[in-house]
């Protein structure tokens, strides 16, 4: 009988109770693991080569207020080695098929997730809900998006009527030309105001005319968060609370928002963003866990800049459940070409 038999029995019993703990705290128990291995009581788990996919679940194209066309966005995603990209234009899915067709025709190993970003109203705040994994052929969903786009256009007209009273007529038509066939947004109106010389920079258009309580502000009449979640679910998607740290609200209100979003059936929330402070990340992750939501992350890419880039610094912590945890695309071979 091996002279280490008693020691092995002891170590096996110890191992049964401590196995998981050891695996998670291997650094602290490195010596213990070495001992167990030495006495052949413990076979460490093989170290798999982990392949990290670059995933970005929030981006915009010229179909809404992004600067790149769907094709240019795919080209940029390819340059940035993004494997999974969700196109989430405001209230439209018009760019998705174009992007998919292009990726397929050029044999680009990227998966385009069908997404959308719906505007909602909640206690006077504009809250954005991203939908991921949608059936973009769903006719009811398309009709609902048309309704949302009509409200977007109607709001733009209300804003431009106020701008006319401020001495700047014809802004609607000018903004429409900036939109170039896509939906009109306040960014287009801001550009038109710059061209008319009303302001020097687009950002000033918001602080002087378009922002809340400013001369040409028109309160939007968006759908409720509950409706947005229902629309997304009805179209087979998952509802994600977008950029929670970007709303101008106190932590108390943010907690209330996340709790209500979860109670209404929301699935996930974005918990990280490039340039987000570590404290904010911790706070959002805590809110996500408390409300049993899954985690999502996206750059909210609108145009190339030094602040935002497709797929950059969007890694989710290992301890969270990602919104894509059960998506079959995560196991598809073509995506793993990058290695
Ligand atoms: Zn947004
Ligand atoms: Zn966005």
Image (cartoon, rainbow, N blue to C red):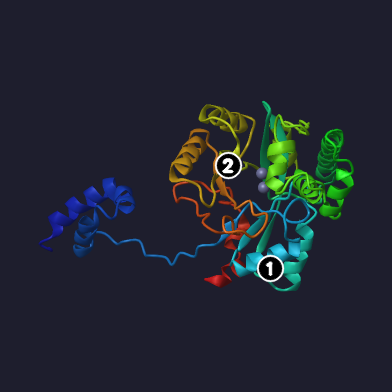
Foreground pick, 306 / 42: 306
Classify mark 1: helix, strand or loop.
Answer: helix
Classify mark 2: helix, strand or loop.
Answer: strand
Image spot of residue 247 (x, y percent): 60, 36
Foreground pick, 84 / 209: 209
Residue reaching furthest to the left: 3
Image spot of residue 272 (x, y percent): 52, 47
Query: Which of disc 2 and disc 1 is earlier in sequence?
Result: 1
Image-quarter location of ligand 1 = top right
Is 23 situated left or right of 91 in this image? Answer: left
Q: From this viewpoint, is residue 90 visible? A: yes
For residue 162, the mark is none
In the rendered structure, are the residues bearing label 1 and label 2 in contact, judged by CB atoms less than 8 Å apart? no
Image spot of residue 24 (x, y percent): 34, 51
Toward which corner of the image does residue 113 lie, by quadrant? bottom right
Is 163 situated left or right of 66 in this image? Answer: right
Foreground pick, 245 / 50: 245
Q: Is residue 266 above or below residue 61?
A: above
Q: Is residue 142 above or below residue 99?
A: above
Foreground pick, 161 / 34: 161
Quarter of the N terminus within the rendering = bottom left
Image spot of residue 299 (x, y percent): 60, 53
Toward which corner of the image does residue 180 lie, by quadrant? bottom right
Badge 1 is on which residue? 75
Is 61 situated left or right of 322 in this image? Answer: right
Say which residue appears at 80% left-offset and 54% top-offset: 94
Query: Callout 1: 10 Å neighbours few (<14), some, many (20+)?
Result: some
For residue 269, the mark is 2
**Between marks 1 and 2, how big is the CA–CA gap?**
27 Å
Say which residue appears at 54% left-offset and 49% top-offset: 273
């Amino acid at each position: 009988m091996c002279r280490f038999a008693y020691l092995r029995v002891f170590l096996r019993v110890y191992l049964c109770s401590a196995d998981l703990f050891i695996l998670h705290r291997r650094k602290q128990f490195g010596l213990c693991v070495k001992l167990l291995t030495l006495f052949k009581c413990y076979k460490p788990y093989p170290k798999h080569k982990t392949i990290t996919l670059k995933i970005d679940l929030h981006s915009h194209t010229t179909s809404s207020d992004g600067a790149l066309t769907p094709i240019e966005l795919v080209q940029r995603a390819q340059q940035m080695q993004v494997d999974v990209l969700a196109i989430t234009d405001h209230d439209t899915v018009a760019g998705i098929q174009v992007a998919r067709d292009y990726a397929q025709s050029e044999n680009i190993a990227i998966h385009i997730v069908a997404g959308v970003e719906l505007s909602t109203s909640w206690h006077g705040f504009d809250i954005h809900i991203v939908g991921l994994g949608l059936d973009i052929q769903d006719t009811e969903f398309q009709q609902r998006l048309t309704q949302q786009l009509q409200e977007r256009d109607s709001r733009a007209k209300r804003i431009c009527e106020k701008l006319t009273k401020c001495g700047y007529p014809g802004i609607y038509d000018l903004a429409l030309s900036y939109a170039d066939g896509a939906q009109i947004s306040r960014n287009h109106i801001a550009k038109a105001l710059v061209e008319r010389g009303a302001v020097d920079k687009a950002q000033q258009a918001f602080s002087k005319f378009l922002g809340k309580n400013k001369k040409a502000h028109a309160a939007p009449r968006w759908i409720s968060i509950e409706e947005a979640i229902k629309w997304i679910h009805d179209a087979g998607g998952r509802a994600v609370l977008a950029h929670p740290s970007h709303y101008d609200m106190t932590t108390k209100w943010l907690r209330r928002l996340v709790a209500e979003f979860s109670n209404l059936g929301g699935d996930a929330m974005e918990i990280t963003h490039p340039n987000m402070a570590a404290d904010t990340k911790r706070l959002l992750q805590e809110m996500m866990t408390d409300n049993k939501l899954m985690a999502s992350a996206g750059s909210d890419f609108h145009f190339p800049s030094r602040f935002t880039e497709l797929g950059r610094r969007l890694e989710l912590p290992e301890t969270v459940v990602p919104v894509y945890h059960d998506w079959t695309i995560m196991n598809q071979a073509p995506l793993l070409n990058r290695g």
